[in-house]
Amino acid sequence: MSLRPDALTWTALLSKWIEFAQSSVALPDDAEGQRWRESITSIITLQAVTFALGDLDRLPTEERPLARDKAEILIQDHVRHIETVWRGVNLPPMLLEIVEDARLQWRHALYAGIVDLVWMGKDPWVVPNINADDYTYGTLAIMQPGTIVMPGEPVAWCVDGDLDRLESDLSGCVRQAPDGPRQVYRQIDDHGRITHDLICPLETELPAGLPLLVPLLERGERIGHFTLDPESWLAQQNASMPDAMIPVDDQTAPNQTSNQQSPH
């Protein structure tokens, strides 16, 4: 099937991967054949949805929310059908893997098309005043206004959000396409002094430190607010700053586990 990237729709993607699943899934013919036969439609659909979700970032931004919702409903319905068919017996490992793959891919697809806004200046920068209520759709996280940002740090990230407004509010930051959402943790010693910043994937084991990116929206639902007075927050950081720029340990940098950044 030939699909033009500028004309992709959820239906076309799903159709493409249904063809793939039908040609690649070999169902066993044994004593449990009846259960397998009753599961075949759900198996094919779950694999098709799994692969289609992997292409979700190729869809136009405005189509992604509906595609995620449709995928979620399909996964729930077909997992429920499989569990009904196999009630009273253990699900075969193959089916368990198919179900878990679909659920995991859907969770990853929540961040399909994610965009970071990264401060790329040579010197530290202070996040300006932003009205969080101006943002009403998509999934969004932004650093608290008044936060001191080091070069190379993500100041905000969004999925299917108002990027034009975000770029205007964070003038000077640069768009980047990360592998997934990131968080910046500010590390503080026992004396209350800032020691370094740690950039790591959001969905990782929670490290020590103060998370700087504030979750504001999740799929259009308000989940957070800025809670600090920007001037007071800035003064608090200035009082805790090291003598030079804050070193940055970027554990999301490509081809390396950390990227130490310090003044020359």
Image (cartoon, rainbow, N blue to C red):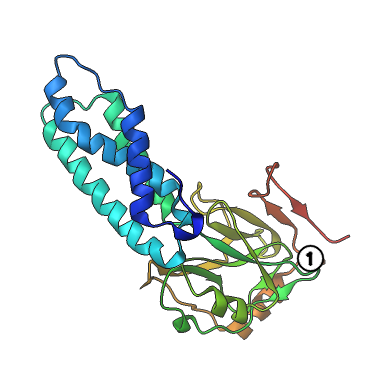
| Disc 1 secondary structure class | loop
* Residue at the image point whose x is 34% and y is 47% from the top: 14
Q: Which residue is mark 1?
A: 245
Residue 28's place in the image compared with 195, above or below, is above
In the displayed structure image, the side of residue 148 where residue 263 appears, left or right:
right
Q: Position of residue 187 (x, y in %)?
A: 64, 58
**Foreground pick, 136 / 263:** 136
Image-quadrant location for residue 10 = bottom left
**Foreground pick, 155 / 178:** 178
Name the residue at the top extreme: 30
* Residue at the image point whose x is 41% and y is 74% from the top: 137
Q: Position of residue 177 (x, y in %)?
A: 60, 58
Image-quadrant location for residue 170 = bottom right
Q: Quadrant of the C terminus?
A: bottom right
* Residue at the image point whose x is 28% and y is 36% from the top: 44
Name the residue at the front extreme: 2
Name the residue at the right extreme: 264
- Residue 102 in view here: no
**Foreground pick, 36 / 235:** 36
In the displayed structure image, the side of residue 246 where residue 166 appears, left or right:
left
Amino acid bearing label 1? Met
Q: Residues within 10 Å of mark 1 (few under 14, many from 20)?
A: some
Residue 93's place in the image compared with 2, above or below, is above
**Foreground pick, 172 / 183:** 172
Q: Position of residue 255 (x, y in %)?
A: 70, 41
Q: Position of residue 116 (x, y in %)?
A: 59, 63
